[in-house]
Every structure is written in C-alpha cells, then in structure tokens.
Image (spheres, rainbow, N blue to C red):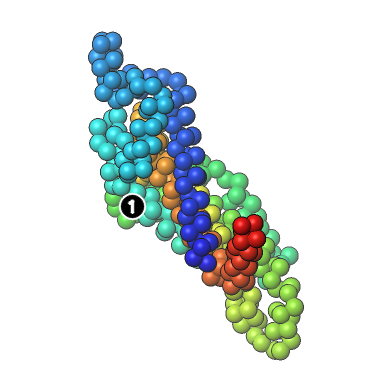
Amino acid sequence: MLKYILKRILYIIPVMFGVIVLVFIMKTVTPGDPVASLLPGTATEEMKNNLREQLGLNDPVLKQFGSYVLGVVQGDLGTSYKTRQPVAQEIAMRLPNTITIAIWAMFIAQIIATPLGILAAVKQNSVADSIIVVFTMIGASVPGFWLALMLIQWFAIDLHWVPSMYDGSLKSWILPIVSITFGSVAATTRGVRTNMLEVIRQDYIKTARAKGQKETIVIWKHAFRNTLIPVIAGIGGGLEGMMGGAVVTEQVFAVPGVGKYIADAVSARNFPSLQGGIIVIALICCVINIIVDVGYTVADPRLKTTLMKSSVKKTKAAKGVA
C-alpha cells in the first residue's frame, strides 16, 4: 500500500511538468503585449522596452521557460506584473477562501446527495425516484454562471435576504456555496443511486432480508457500506470540479479567492499570476486524486488486496527479467 501511495505521488511530477509546459505555451502564443496594459497610453517606446527588460520578456523563450521551471521547483511562482508582489504570497492569501467554499459545498452536497441517491434506488420507479432523477438531470445541465446570476436575482435583489456580492459577512458566503453545491448534489446523487441499485440486487442483501432483518438495517448497515466508492468518487470529483469552477463562481460573487485571482489575471494579461493560479489548482487536484485513491482502499479492502497482488506480480516479473 505504501509503495502504491509513493508511486501515485511520483506521478504528480510528470503531470505538474505538463501543466507548467501548457501554461507557459499559453503565455507564449497569447496575442497582445502585457506591457501595454501596465503602462499609460502616453508611454514612450523606450519606457516599454525598459519594462520588458525588467520583466524578462526580451529573453529567448527557452531561457524564460528554464528560469520559470527553476523558480517553480524552488517554490517561486514569479512576481505579479500588476502589484509587483510574489505570486505565491498573493495566492496563499486567497487560497483559504477558495478552500472554504469548496469544503462547505462538498459537505452540504454529501449530506443531501447520499440520502437522495439511496431513496431513489430503494424506491425505484416510484414518484420520488422520478422526481430525484429529473432533479439530477437538471442539476447536470444547468450552467453554473446562469445559476449564480439567478440566485443573485432571486435572493439578493428580489428578496433582500443575502448580499449579492461577497463583503466578508457570513451571509455573503451563502450564495457562492449554494451555487457551487447544486451541480455536485446532482452528480453524487446519480452515482449513489446507480451503485445502490446494483448492491441491493446482490445475493447477500437477499439473504439479510430472508433472515428477517429490518429494512433500515439491510440498507444502511449492509448495502450502504458498499456504496461508499461512488460517494468517495463524488467527493473527489466534486472538489476538483469546485476548484475549477471557482473561477466562475468567485468572479460572479466577487469572492477574493484563487478563482477570481485567475480571472483578473486573464483580463489584465498578468501572466505570472495566471500561471501560478493554474499550477496551484492543478497541484491541489493531484493531491485530491491521491486521497481519493487511498479512500477507495479504506472503503473496500478488496481493492487493497488487488493492489498488493499487482505489486507482487510486478516485483516477481522484474526479478525474472533480472
């Protein structure tokens, strides 16, 4: 198991290198001159060239890439063009807001989605099941930005229950969290329902019922334990989606998180901030994947046995080759 975890951690290296290459290429091929947005329109060509020299934009592309990779390895994500502050420091200040929204949204989503998925499976083809299935279809198809705007219209402008934009108060967290929770509830509910339908048809469930055990015990003690895989998958996939969707949600609600930081960097052609934000989000998603994979083996020990057997076979094969 430890070898598997270490191997998954090592996989992060090529993934992150690929992300760094992609974001650097994105910077290189993006049209426009960032210097034009940093200097006033009256700036002379000499002033522009001096600023390009300071920012290292006049260096060869390979030299720029090598310097950037070396900096990232050392924890230096560059310096923001706009504020002239270290990008890593600015992201560290905003990351707690993004994580707060993601964790609360995922916590609420699991509380709602898991019972709904189980209810839909147990009451298959009933009115309740039909309603839940329709809800999951709507949740999977509604665009996040549209939902966010509708929430602002209904609850902030029409009803005046909550602020329309983030202002630091507890109420201003409600709409961003609800907005990003909706899609996750739909996806997790669908996954739990599908897996529960398979589980409740298994022989051991029929045996438990034949022994006269109460239906609640059969469902929650025997069946639910075997639906933890989609629940864990829903948590991992939901968190990753929320980290990516934070760009839209935080921009709409003006939440000072990493998502808004990336969106602002795009509009300002602030490439170091944009690259740093994407790299941090990608790294967090890689870590989430590792945690989810480990969670699978905890929820289903059979997966752990499979991993151990696979590792033993590879070791024997390697010795045979040697």
Q: Position of residue 19 (x, y in %)?
A: 47, 39
The residue closer to the viewer here, 45 or 179, is 45
Apparent side of residue 300 relative to residue 14 in the rendered image (left or right): right
Q: Position of residue 226 (x, y in %)?
A: 62, 72
For the point 28% across and 30% down, which residue is it? 82
Horizontal and vertical percent for residue 134?
65, 55
Q: Quadrant of residue 120?
A: bottom right
Instruction: Give me the residue at 50% from left, 45% from top.
Output: 15
**Vertical order, 78 against 232 (above or below):** above
Judging depth in this view, the residue of 135 and 15 nearest the camera is: 15
Q: Is residue 65 above or below residue 241?
A: above
Quadrant position of the C terminus in the picture = bottom right
The residue type indicated by label 1 comes to Pro
Q: Which class describes the residues within 10 Å of circle 1: few (<14), some (14-19), or many (20+)?
A: some
Q: Is residue 25 visible?
A: yes
Q: Is residue 115 visible?
A: no
Camera-side residue of 144 and 316? 316
Q: Position of residue 312 (x, y in %)?
A: 61, 66
Residue ID at (70%, 67%): 197
Secondary element under disc 1, as helix, strand or loop, is helix
The residue that mark 1 highlights is 96
Which residue appears farthest toward the front when viewing the image?
A: 322
Q: Residue 202 falls in which quadrant of the image?
A: bottom right
Q: With 190 as the anchor, is 70 left or right in this view?
A: left
Q: Residue at x 57, y 45 (%)?
A: 142
Q: Is residue 203 above or below residue 5?
A: below
Number of dots carrying numbers: 1
